Structure formats: structure tokens, C-alpha cells
Amino acid sequence: MDFRLNEEEQAFQNEVRDWVQEMFRDVLPPGFAGVDPGPEEEEREDIKQIAAEIWKRLGAKGWIGLGWPKEYGGQESEAKSWILNQELIYNGIPGMDIAACQGDLILQFGTEEQKKRFLFPISRGEVKYAIGMSEPDVGSDMFSLQLKAEEKEDHYLFNGQKIWNTGIHHVDWCVVYARTDPNADKQHNGISVFIIDPRSPGITLRQITQITGLGAFCEVFYDDVKVPKENLLGAKNRGKDVSMYAFTIERSYGLVILHNAMRYFDQLVEYCKETEVNGQPLAKDPLIRNKLGEMAIELEVGRNLGDRINWMIAQGMMTVIPGCQNKIYGARVAQKLSNLGMEILGLYGQLDDTSKCAQLGGRFRHMYLSSRAWSLAGGTSEMSRNIIAGPFGLGLPSK
Amino acid sequence: MDLAFSEEQEMLWKSARDFLADKCPKTLVRDMEADELGNPPELWKEMAELGWLGLPFPEKYDGGGMSFLDLVVLMEEMGRACLPGPFFSTVVLGGLPVMEWGSEEQKQDILPKICKGEAILTLALTESSARYDAVSIRTLATPEGDDYLISGTKLFVPDANIADWIICVARTNQTASPEEGITLFLVDAKSPGISTTVLSTIAGDKQCEVVFDKVKVTKKDVLGEVGQGWTMVKKIVEWAALAKSAEMVGGNQQVLEMTIQYAKDRIQFGKPIGAFQIIQHYIADMSLDADSARITLHKAAWKMNEGLSCAKEVSVIKGWINDAYRRVTTVSHQIHGAIGFTKDHDLELYFRRAKAGEVLFGDSDFHREIVAQELGL
């Protein structure tokens, strides 16, 4: 038994840490406190520009798609891929795009031609991706989706609507799940996946403002949109396979949430050491010590869950249960931390980053609001519990 | 990174589980709760023969020369089986300190006897404050020529009623700093002046009040160095917190497994209750508590095994399993309904042990404070 990284991984981690320091020096503004991973905060113009710059630099470094085969620009190392993500996420560096994950799908299901066409621009950090899954009547019950894609002679014709399509107004490609066979014996047998250019004629986007005040969601209307046949990903009507695979590779989402939370926590600990109230640092208050101690325990437990799943992935083991457990856990701990931060900041917790007197850059106010999404996005915590209990998990009966 | 156990550890695991399933049925567990002494002699002898009592001690003292990680593997299974008796007191609270700080003479005298099942040890640490802090140590060891006279009352001393040796934590010097002036003594439990009363505890284990009334010990009975006792106590509490966590993780795992089985078997409204989403979600959360605690236990045990500093990791697991085991047994009671509320069902054994484990060697508040200190707060 050994919980340490091996020598090669350790060296890579050091290399990444040096590179992150370089980004702080060269690209990020002075005193940069970090942002959440994902496209949401790229709604801020300054963050959008930084993200684009870093994405390009990651590409130049050869660090996008580290888990991919060498022939597509990868290093065939899942471990390195996670080490990189962990450092970027902990430090709150904007830029890592979900294109890397969508590339995993293309690698698994794409034709040789698609791999050449789509993967290289991703690995060079030139293109950004979004995912189109939810619809007005389709949330957790994703296989009931209705966006229609009719096969015509040389294209598919799209009609219908998507919603909660995060960041689609900024990206080059969107991976969209649509119904290609309305008469399939089972709902999930009539779905296909497409790589769509959001600027195609007939697509209308309407931004939706989120609880944080950022307009990262879009409603997407498809009116007679022609999508070329060569943009079909995987076999027609086998979208279920793609979505299941997408689910298994999203197994690190819980860790993404946790490692992001670790940065907030460390900033909160520093705040408590430095902030004096009535002549005494907050850190001396027994109640605050207890709560921070409890939080640190929960974050460490989360780190250990991360070690477990990463090791299991490296061993090629089934990770359905741990992936879902980590998702539930990460969201719960991060949400709890967001409330703890608000509690400790008290009246200051109300203020956002633009306000006079804001503490910790108003980040906890942002986290308190944005963390609502973490138990919803990528499958709700309740769906994760269903999966843990079900046939691929603990095997509890369905009837 | 390699999170697998070795082949030997896997074997120890399996043999421990099989042995305890066979030799430690719940009828025995209940009998021992009611028993005055609380140690089944046959089982104690067999554990000695299996080499369990000497597992972590060097071979030259007839021990198994195995590691702390091996001990954790074994203790998980002991927790799963609700093993009664003084294994924890003898090996963890008594044997490990003797191995670490004992003189050659003390080691040669005591360790082989532990290994053979001929000596029971325990630690007399806590007093009326019921806290694990130095200021609470009020028992005095007053020098008198070449001897010391120990006087004071110790509380919650496990298995003192059957112990052959008691490691007594006493104050040899009154100083301004409570952490200084504390010394550990290896006291013959049959010494004149010692009186022991068994307390009636929630888990039915044998925690005792031990009154020391001018108990005479010699300088040769000092364990480690005079005045350096508190550093040793901190280390012992670290071992004990980790070992107790191992027992709790094992019990927690057993409760999860029996709850899953019950949810599959119990029919209500024409179907197994495990088919209801609310039960499924309860159990999913229980699995998260169980799995997260196990990996966290193994991380702490591995660090301790490697001789790396592990104060934080030990407090992380004890602070976590305290709450996780209570949550899991509580929800399990809700799922089991009335049957779990009876003395006929095993669940109540675990529910009571979860609470006992929680308060022994640091409740969650205690360990959160240690973690806070580790954060530099």
C-alpha cells in the first residue's frame, strides 16, 4: 500500500505547479483569487479573455487530452490528466474547457475522419465545446428528450428546443442529443448524438441569467437546422451508448467540485487567522475552530475518495459506485462550506465583488449561490443515489 | 499509488473473518456483556495460538513482527464481530507502549507473556474530568526514597478488573505547564492499595474506576522517562484512536451489509422495501459513509506504518468515523423498524458500540480541535 504519486507523476505535478506559478505571473491579474471550473464565470469579460489565453497555452504545452493516444496528441496517461486538472482547479485557473471531455467521446465513438477533424483542434486549444442535453420537459429523465432530427438525403433536419445549454453562445461546437427514431421500441433506442455548429442557420439562442447574475445558460431553438451527416457521432439510434460512456468518464466531477472547494477553504482559513474582531483573531474563537476543523476533516475525506477512484480507474476497475458517491459527496461538502463561509463572514457575506467593503473578493457570496448547481448539474444527487442502489451498484431490487 | 492490500493482508483478513464468524457468535458477545469478567478464556487462548495477541511485537519477544497496517486489518474484523475481551487494552493500550518505551527488562518480562495470552494489560489515563487532556491528570506519584507512592482515582479504565499490569499516568512534578511533570508507571495490578469497580457501560464492556491509594512502585517500574509522560500519552491516544477507528469501520461495514440484506428480504406493500426510493437513498448514503471511512482509515494506517507524521490523518479518520458510524447505525435502525429495537436482533449491539466508540479516545470535537491546530489556527 502506498498513497504517494510515483516518481514520474510527482515530477509532472511539480512541472504543472511551476507552470501555474508562471500563469499567475504572466497571465492572471495581481491578487487573482481564482474562479470556479466550467464556463459559467467566463461570462465576465476579463475571465473570458484569460480563459482563451490559458486554453491556448495549455494546447501549446501539449496538455490537452493527456489521456489520449499519442497519435492524437495525447500521452496516454489518465493519471497525468487528473494531476493537471487538480492543480488548475485548486488554483482556480480559468480556461480548462469541457472540449477535453467531449474529445474523449469522439475518441471512443468517432470515425477515423472525425477523430482527425475534431481532436487536433481540441488538443491545440483552438476550439471550445458545449453539451446540449436538457429540454424544457427533460431533466433527469434524459432519455425522454424530444428534439427531432430527421434523416434526409444528405443531412439531418433539426426541429425543437434545448434549454440550460451552458456556454453554447461562446463555443465552436456543441455535442447535441436528439431523437432520430420517434417510433423506437424503447425511448432510449431512438436517440443519436451530433456535433453541431451553434452558428448554423436556423439556430436561435436566448441567454438566461443564472442565480449568480451570470448569463451562462441558453435556451436553444432549432428551426429547420441542417446538420451534415458526417457530424453524427456513433451509430444512428445508439445515442444511449454515447451517453452512458459520457457518464462513466464524468466520474471525476465530484472531485472537481471538491478540489475547487479546497481553495475557498484555504482562503477562509487565512481570513480567520488575519481578521481580528474585538481585539482577537477569529481563529481563536472555539466555535470557529470547531467548524473549520470539521470542514477540514470532510475535505480530507473527499481527497481520500479521490485517491480511491483514481487508483481504481488506473486498475481498470468498475467505478460506477465511487463516481456517484464522489459526486454526492463533493456537492454536499462544497455546499456546506459555502454556508460556513457565509456564516463566518456574517453581514459581509452579503457583498459581491463590486461592492465597497467586500471580503475575500465576494467569493463566498458567489459560491453560496453557484453551489446550488453542484448537486444538480451532471446528474442530480438523487439520480446518483438511484444508480448506487441499482443494478450496477448495490443491487437493490427495482420492484 | 498502490491502494491494494498485500496477499498476506488479504489472507489475514479472510482467516480473521472466518475464525471470528465461527468462534465469536453473537450469543458469546451477549454472554460476555453480562459476564462479570468479560473475557472468554477459550477464545483468548485461541487468539494467542493464532498469533494475534503478539501480532505487532518483534519476533524476539515471541511476537509476529507484523505491522500496524496488519493490526488495523485484524481490528476491522474484530469490530465487525463485536469481539469482547481485553484485546484492545492488552495489545494497543498496554503492549505497544511497552514495545516502544519499555526497558529491555520490561520488554522481556511482559511482551512474551502478552503473546502467549498470559498477561492482560491496560492503561489508566482518564480521571473525573473524563477528558483526554494533560490538565486532567491529577493522580500523584510522590517520590519516597527509591520508590513512588501513587494516589488518585482513574476512571473509564478498560478491563482493569482482569488486568495483570496497569500502565498508570501520574503526575510526578507539579509545574506551571500541565503537559510537564507527567510519568507513566507499569503497576502490578495486584499491588496493595488498588481497588477496582466495574462501571456499567452502554456497550457492556468492562470500563472501571480504579482507585490508587498509596500504591507503592519502584523506579524500575517507570515506563520511558520520568516527566516525559505526556508526549507518550499523546502517541498512545493516537494509536488508540486509529485502532478504535478500525473497529468502528469494521462494525460500520457489517451494519451496511446487513441493512442491504434486510432491505432485499423485507416485504411491505407487496415488494421488498429496498425497491422504495427512500430506502435506496438511505442505503446509498450509508455506503458513502462506509466507503469513505474505510479509505480514510487505510490512509492514516499507511502513514503511521511508514513512520510519517500522521496526527492530522488520525484525527481525520476518528473525527469522521465517530459521526459516520452513528449516522449509519441510526439510519439502519430506521430501515429495520421494530425488529432492530429488540435484544433479539444484532443491530442493537452495533448501535451501542457506535456510541461507545465515539466517545473513546476523542469525540469529534476533540479531533476537530487537533485538525484546527494542524491548520495553524
Image (tube, coloured by chain):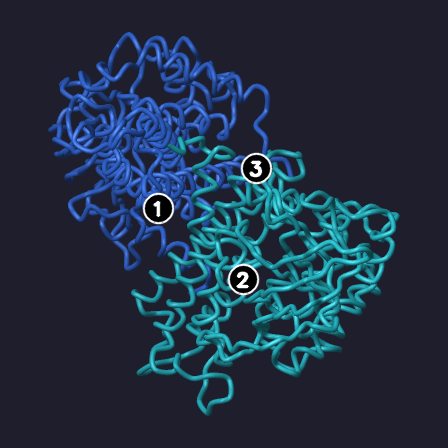
Chain colours: A cyan, B blue
- Occupied quadrant, residue B84: top left
**Relative to residue A68, is residue B260 drawn left or right?**
left
Q: Position of residue A329 (x, y in %)?
A: 45, 51
**Are the numbered discs 1 and 2 placed on the same chain, yes or no?**
no
Is residue A13 shown to the viewer in this render?
no
Relative height, residue B190 to residue B348 (above, below)? above
**Are the numbered discs 2 and 3 placed on the same chain, yes or no?**
no
Q: Residue at x 55, y 49 (%)?
A: A143
Q: Residue at x 13, y 20 (%)?
A: B34
> Of helix, strand and loop, which one carries label 3?
loop
Question: Label 3: chain?
Answer: B
Foreground pick, B180 / A229: A229
Q: Quadrant of the C terminus of chain A?
A: top left
> Of helix, strand and loop, which one carries label 1?
helix
Residue density around tag 2, few if under 14, some if 14–19, many if 20 or more, within 10 Å: many
Q: CA distance from mark 2 to mark 3?
A: 53 Å
Relative height, residue B144 to residue A59 (above, below)? above
Q: Residue at x 33, y 52 (%)?
A: B179
Q: Amino acid at mark 2?
A: Glu
